[in-house]
């Protein structure tokens, strides 16, 4: 696991460098020699693939950028699913983006997820790693990730981050979201899953939701690359992650790109969601 974390750290440093280069955030742009630049998310995907290919314990990788998983080493034990640059369109407007990693043992299913990691590329580069019941925060300083602290969620937060298009929400979902605001919750939603969930984790709690709705009955966010990795992180930090009715990590996955409705939060907010969805 140490080698995997080190490969993720090296990838993050290289991706950050790519983000900082002026031309690359703009897909289909040409560089000064007239060559088409590689889109930033494709470049990030290649960086991670290359770094993980040096780690003997990695059996298979699956990327949000690729249709199918790729076997790296038959003798390896870990299956890693990653979203190389989540919310990459936000780079062009200079908002924070992130990379997400789910580290599964033996196969890509929620119950086999053993560790998760994400990196936020914001004003600072931070990395969060969840493993063996602990969620640890690291900060990139002078080329190295320095340990900062453990992350723990409170029982109840003050942030409400409601994803999806309101026009397509179920009426009871809208009533629930409005009732959180009526109780004083503050709206915090950038459109980047990584910074939006990072904020809830570091501010001690709240609710992030991306529900099933009439336009997207199974939600938008991908199980293996987005939903499951953050579910493990929220659970290890003392919170919960559900699809409205059940724990997301208990859900089955038929295809690597399957999506799931999802709610991440501290215990109080998730109890409210379970109650509302249980009655509808
Ligand atoms: O999966 C991509 C993503 O950009 C997430 O990072 C984010 O939470 C979500 O989509 C935002 O979707 P929407 O624009 O529908 O709120």
Image (spheres, rainbow, N blue to C red):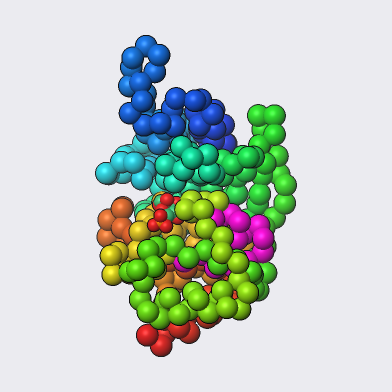
Residue under the image location 34 percent in, 41 percent down:
65
Query: Would you say residue 270 is visible in this rendering?
Result: yes
Ligand 1 lies in quarter: bottom left
Residue 160 falls in image quadrant? bottom right
The N terminus is located in which quarter? top right
Q: Give yes or no for residue 198 being in the magenta stretch.
A: yes
The C terminus is located in which quarter? bottom left
* Left or right of 73 in this view: 229: right
* Relative height, residue 65 to residue 163 (above, below): above
Residue under the image location 33 percent in, 14 percent down:
34
Question: Residue 19: where, in percent of width, then height?
Answer: 50, 31
* Left or right of 152 in this view: 86: left
Residue under the image location 65 percent in, 29 percent down:
143
* Relative height, residue 55 to residue 273 (above, below): above
Q: Identify which residue, 63 or 276, lies in the foreground.
A: 276
Question: Residue 233: where, in percent of width, then height?
Answer: 55, 59
Question: Residue 278: where, in percent of width, then height?
Answer: 42, 85
Question: Residue 137: where, in percent of width, then height?
Answer: 66, 49
* Relative height, residue 34 to residue 241 (above, below): above
* Relative height, residue 9 to residue 101 (above, below): above
- Furthest-bottom residue in this view: 279
Residue bounds of the magenta highlight: 196-209
Q: Identify which residue, 159 or 146, lies in the foreground.
A: 159
Q: Identify which residue, 246 or 96, lies in the foreground.
A: 96
Residue under the image location 37 percent in, 11 percent down:
33
- Furthest-top residue in this view: 33
Q: Identify which residue, 159 or 137, lies in the foreground.
A: 159
Query: Would you say residue 119 is visible in this rendering?
Result: no
Q: Give yes or no for residue 202 being in the magenta stretch.
A: yes
């Amino acid at each position: 696991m140490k080698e995997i974390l080190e490969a993720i750290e090296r990838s993050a440093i290289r991706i950050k460098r790519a983000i900082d280069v002026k031309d690359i955030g703009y897909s289909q742009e040409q560089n000064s020699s007239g060559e088409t630049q590689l889109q930033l998310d494709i470049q990030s995907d290649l960086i991670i693939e290359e770094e993980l290919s040096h780690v003997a314990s990695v059996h298979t990788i699956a990327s949000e950028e690729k249709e199918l998983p790729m076997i790296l080493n038959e003798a390896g034990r870990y299956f890693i699913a990653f979203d190389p640059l989540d919310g990459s369109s936000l780079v062009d407007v200079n908002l924070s983006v992130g990379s997400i990693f789910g580290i599964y043992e033996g196969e890509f299913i929620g119950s086999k997820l053993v560790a998760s990691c994400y990196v936020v590329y914001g004003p600072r580069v931070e990395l969060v790693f969840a493993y063996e019941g602990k969620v640890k925060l690291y900060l990139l300083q002078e080329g190295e990730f320095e340990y900062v602290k453990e992350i723990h969620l409170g029982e109840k937060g003050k942030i409400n981050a409601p994803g999806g298009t309101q026009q397509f929400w179920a009426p009871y979902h809208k009533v629930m979201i409005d009732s959180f605001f009526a109780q004083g919750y503050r709206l915090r939603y950038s459109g980047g899953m990584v910074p939006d969930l990072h904020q809830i984790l570091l501010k001690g709690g709240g609710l992030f939701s991306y529900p099933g709705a009439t336009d997207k009955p199974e939600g938008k966010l991908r199980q293996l690359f987005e939903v499951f990795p953050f579910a493990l992180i929220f659970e290890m930090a003392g919170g919960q992650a559900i699809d409205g009715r059940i724990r997301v990590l208990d859900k089955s996955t038929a295809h690597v790109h399957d999506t799931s409705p999802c709610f991440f939060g501290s215990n109080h907010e998730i109890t409210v969601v379970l109650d509302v969805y249980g009655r509808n």
